Image (spheres, rainbow, N blue to C red):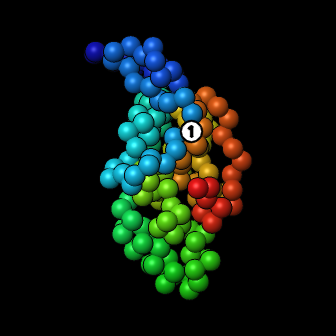
Amino acid sequence: MNKKTLLVHISNVIKGCEKTEVSLGAGAIPRSLIRPTALDEQVVYRFKAAQAAAAQDGQKIYIVSGYRTLNRQKTLFNQAVQKYKSIDEASKWVAPPLVSHHPWGIAIDVNYPDDPIGASWLETHGYKFGLCRVFENEWWHFEPVIAPGWKCPSLVPDARYSKN
Ligand SMILES: [Zn+2]
């Protein structure tokens, strides 16, 4: 049987990467200046690195929802308002379009709704890759709010406390 060896390098070095390496960034990944049309590339790299490390620990993590168009976020928010019968209650679960970080390509929903165990692996180890859970009420939602290896900030209660 052929054994495959995986080597995961975690680095927040911008310059000094080998040709075949990519930097995971040296800080939080901020919003871009213009509205993107896809998930931020560095978020993708961070997640792929985390995914490889998770696999070595026997855990499977996958993105269920990453980038969303503003219209998609609007639809989701309106559905939540219908469901919860109030804008404030809906905002706890689905951030309003202009607040949500999904349309900025810097938020990912992981393993929702089927596999909280995998997501809890990411909650424990995500900081190494610069990915943090941010909301108390959403175990599946992660954002690139730190440099890889830094400490994730304390959770905020819900999407209403989203920092802009
Ligand atoms: Zn989310």
Above or below: residue 123 compared with residue 53? below
The reply to whether residue 82 is visible in this rendering is yes
For numbered disc 1, what is the local secondary structure? loop
At 51% from the left and 81% from the top, the residue drawn is 81
> Under 8 Å from ligand 1: the CB of mark 1?
no
Residue closer to the observer: 96 or 55:
96
Q: Nearer the viewer, residue 156 or 69?
A: 69
Residue 24 against residue 40 in the figure, above or below: above
Task: Assign the C terminus to one quadrant of the image.
Answer: bottom right
Front in this rendered view, residue 139 or 57: 139
3 relative position to 16: left or right: left
Q: Quadrant of residue 42?
A: top left
Left or right, residue 54 beside residue 137: left
Q: Position of residue 39 (x, y in %)?
A: 38, 47
In the rendered image, residue 102, in percent from the top left (x then y), is placed at 45, 56
The type of residue carrying mark 1 is Ala
**Which residue is located at x 56 percent, y 39 percent?**
28
Residue 57 x/y as whole percent = 50, 30
Residue 121 visible in the current orientation: no
Dividing the image into 4 quarters, which one contains the N terminus? top left
The outermost residue toward the front is 33
Residue of label 1: 28
Mark 1 burial class by Cα count in 10 Å: few <14, some 14-19, many 20+: some
